[in-house]
Image (tube, rainbow, N blue to C red):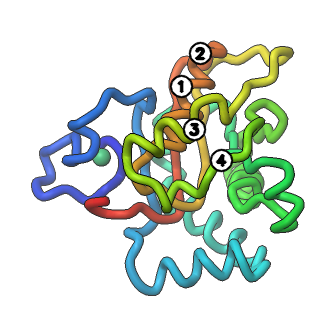
Amino acid sequence: MHCGKPLDREEQEYCADCRKKDSYITQGRALWVHSDPVPRAVYRFKYHNRRGYGVVFAREMAGHYEEWIRKCKIDLIVPVPLHPSKKRKRGFNQAEILAKTLSEETGIPVRTDVLFRIRKTKPQKELGPSERKANLKGAFAVSASWKAAGNVLLVDDIYTTGSTAERCAYMLKRAGVQNVWFLTISIGQGI
Ligand SMILES: [Zn+2]
């Protein structure tokens, strides 16, 4: 299983979406499939300021995937960043809450100052596959003073087509990270 989406046959590594593209991500996992009641809970967490949900989600992620995280030899946890103006508006970055709690649960360090969103982008859910990719060009930057190395676990709330995770992974690898893994609360199927 490459991205974490449930597969028709267990022996398959790539789902239909992953087979279509080259990936900068070594492997990904998600806690749940994005179907009721998961989307409502994630929505409340993000847009109704239920930060406590994030802690619960992250503890669940740690409980479920601690062994996988150890096997991947993760050196550092990095949340998918929000643009500063969006973070100000929402009051917090949901991925940051997940990443920090995961760090507390696993003892693996977290950095929120190495990967940045430097350009405001349209919401990905409003765009088609090729527009999603174009929308993210130049959206992220990696700190020049950071000595990137090793295995990074990228954390976000939802994985749909994976274009955001892929773009972040591309930036991290270009900066010198060896392997990028990712973990999300939920994953959309057949999108
Ligand atoms: Zn896949």
Q: Residues within 10 Å of mark 1 (few under 14, many from 20)?
A: some
User: Does any portion of residue 1 appear in the rendered image?
Assistant: no
- Tag 1 secondary structure: helix
Figure check: 36 above or below 106: below
Q: Residues within 10 Å of mark 2 (few under 14, many from 20)?
A: few
Q: Position of residue 131 (x, y in %)?
A: 45, 44
Mark 3, mark 1: which one is toward the viewer? Answer: 3
Q: Residues within 10 Å of mark 3 (few under 14, many from 20)?
A: many
**Viewer-side residue, 111 vs 39:** 39
The answer to which quarter of the image holds residue 49 is bottom right
Which residue bears the numbered disc 2? 174
Task: Tell me if 4 is positioned left or right of 43 in this view.
Answer: left
Q: Residue at x 37, y 46 (%)?
A: 129
**Viewer-side residue, 126 vs 185:** 126
Q: Residue at x 53, y 64 (%)?
A: 185
Labelled pair 4, 2 in contact (Cβ < 8 Å): no
Q: Image quadrant for the N terminus?
A: top left
Q: Residue at x 21, y 40 (%)?
A: 13
Q: What's the residue type where badge 4 is placed? A: Thr
Figure check: 27 above or below 96: above
Q: Image quadrant for the C terminus?
A: bottom left
Figure check: 71 above or below 22: below
Q: What's the residue type where badge 2 is placed? A: Arg
Which residue bears the numbered disc 1? 170
